[in-house]
Image (spheres, rainbow, N blue to C red):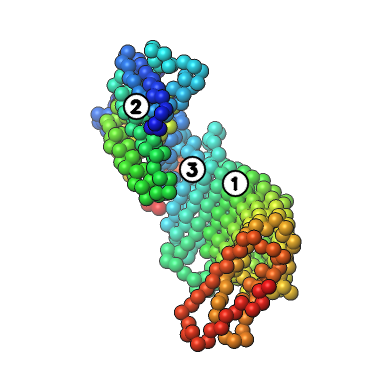
Amino acid sequence: MDGDGDSDGRADVPAASAEAEISGAVVPSAAVDLLSGLPDDLLVYILLHLDPVDAAEAARTCVLSRRWRDLWVQVPSLVFLCLNPVGCARVHAALAARARAVAAPDITRLHVYYFAGHSFPPTASWLSLAPPVLSGELVFFKDWQTPIAANELPADIMKRTAFELPCFKKATKIYLHLEFLTLLLPPSGAFNALTELKLEQIRFDGQFILGDSMFPSLQRLLIDNTLGLVDLALNSSSLVWLKLSHLRGLQRINVEAHSLELLCVVHCLRYNVQVARFSMEGLKVLRWRDRLDPILVNFSEMPHLQQLTIFEFTPYGWPGSNPNQDLFRIINHFSSIQHLELVVSIEPVSVSCSSWTYNGLS
Amino acid sequence: MAAGKPVVMVTLVSSDGQSFQLLEEAALLSAMVRDTIQIGQGRGPAGIPIRNITGQTLSMVVVYCNKHYTAAAAADGDDAADEEKKVANKKQLREWDEQFINLEQDKLYDILVAANNLGIDGLVDLCCWRFADMMKGKSASEIRVKLGIRDDFTSEQRAQIEKDSPWVWSRTT
């Protein structure tokens, strides 16, 4: 409880004291200050219900009175919508205040949505402040104000700007949507508590290595829509769920994840892949929407596989062509299948060229 | 309410001696009542004494508990697959909540304190939402007027705040 309140929790009626006059803020008010006498947790709860996309509204209450000054630093959830670089300065100021506050609990939710066009301020200023005060989820979502395709992005901006992710020892979930800024992982350190990592629209500097030493607790990983990722190496004993999609230009991939239960691969191996190796003996669900050339793609045994979903079966084709070659290869990889989902793609094409294309399924 | 289930009532007694009878299941929304019943008390004719909460406030709390118990019981009986109906019911309950809590500050404060003491999470949440609603979109001085908060900073403290966090003063993002 706060010391300023009376025993029954009701503070005095505001009076025009000399002290208040100095601040120039005395305004006649009919209301009796009931709130200031409430315990911290209730006041923090009230602050939590302020603007859900602008943590600044809760922070602004620090100017109300001494009672309110340090309350907002106890709010566990901070969401910022940055429409210009000042927005990022706010994130910095907020995290700096959290770091300064002695008794403030950790942030359990830090979301920064950045919609400020092409200019991208150095993120390190606020990012580097976040790890010690964050023990929940981090979301950084960057987007232009208007949708723009990857190949239309000004190349100089993307090359210049990197998103240097510091080591978050206590964070449990990290979700980055970088709109093809280059992601740089810290040179050392471990994301000890991290169980979920989602990376979307990311540019990589050629290679991405993700292993137990840096991500010892990682269970779920999504990598979607990348540029510059040539070599992907995942070596994890904790990973359970893995989804890879649209890894453009990928040449080499090596997945060693013996606890993995679900693997989904979508359009990663179509054009450039030279070596793809998947060791995942515990796999239960395989969703495959990609090329499968047995010379390039190598699967371990999957004795526990329960469900296989394959895209897409093309029921029609020119005589002599075999559009379902890869599909049959993957089906024939298994000696028995109990549950098979086939997504059949039927396009409104001329019927004269059709002939059934299921030859090859044994 | 499921048929065949014995109807158990419980009596809550306010600090000024008013008694309120309600279904035990409705009263169980309160963690305090739950704890009392769990240790085998409160079912007798004397009821459960609720200290520090007047009859006027307690009557409102009882209305809230009855409404939410009834809504939950009705939802239990519904077809679990009917998502649309569930969403509609939820929306309706929220509308009821917002109307219910549209109160003057002093009453709202009393209910918040009562809900907090009784451990009724949904009602605490609702009261906090309502207080936040009074603050939303307002400047610091407007909030002070609305809630009667006295600006008790010294000029030194004010200067320090401005120095620490100039960003909070700006309303543009």
**Residue A200 occupies which quadrant of the picture?**
bottom right
User: Vertically, is A148 above or below B117?
Assistant: below
Residue B61 image label? 2
Q: Which residue is mark 3?
A: A77
Q: Which residue is mark 1?
A: A172
Q: Chain of mark 3?
A: A
* Tag in front: 2 or 1: 2
User: Where, quadrant-wise, is the C terminus of chain A in this rendering?
Assistant: bottom right
Residue at 45% x, 59% y is A115
Residue at 65% x, 57% y is A306
Residue at 72% x, 59% y is A302
Residue A164 visible at all? no
User: Where, quadrant-wise, is the N terminus of chain A in this rendering?
Assistant: top left
- The residue nearer to you, when weighing B157 against A172, is A172
Question: In the structure shown, which secondary structural element does the residue marked by tag 1 occupy?
Answer: loop
- The residue nearer to you, when weighing B16 against A2, is B16
Residues tagged 1 and 3 counted as in contact (Cβ below 8 A): no
**Other residues around mark 3 within 10 Å, as few (<14) / some (14–19) / many (≥20):** some
- Give how far apart the Cα atoms at labels 1 and 3 are: 14 Å
Q: Position of residue A39 (x, y in %)?
A: 44, 27
Badge 1 or badge 3: first in the primary sequence: 3
**Other residues around mark 2 within 10 Å, as few (<14) / some (14–19) / many (≥20):** many
Q: Position of residue A317 (x, y in %)?
A: 56, 82
- Give how far apart the Cα atoms at labels 3 and 2 are: 29 Å
Residue at 45% x, 60% y is A116
* Tag in front: 1 or 3: 1
Report whether B19 appears left or right of A360: left
- Name the kind of residue labelled 3 in the image: Ser
User: Vertically, is B17 above or below A309?
Assistant: above
Q: Chain of mark 1?
A: A
Q: Are marks 1 and 3 on the same chain?
A: yes
Residue B38 image label? none
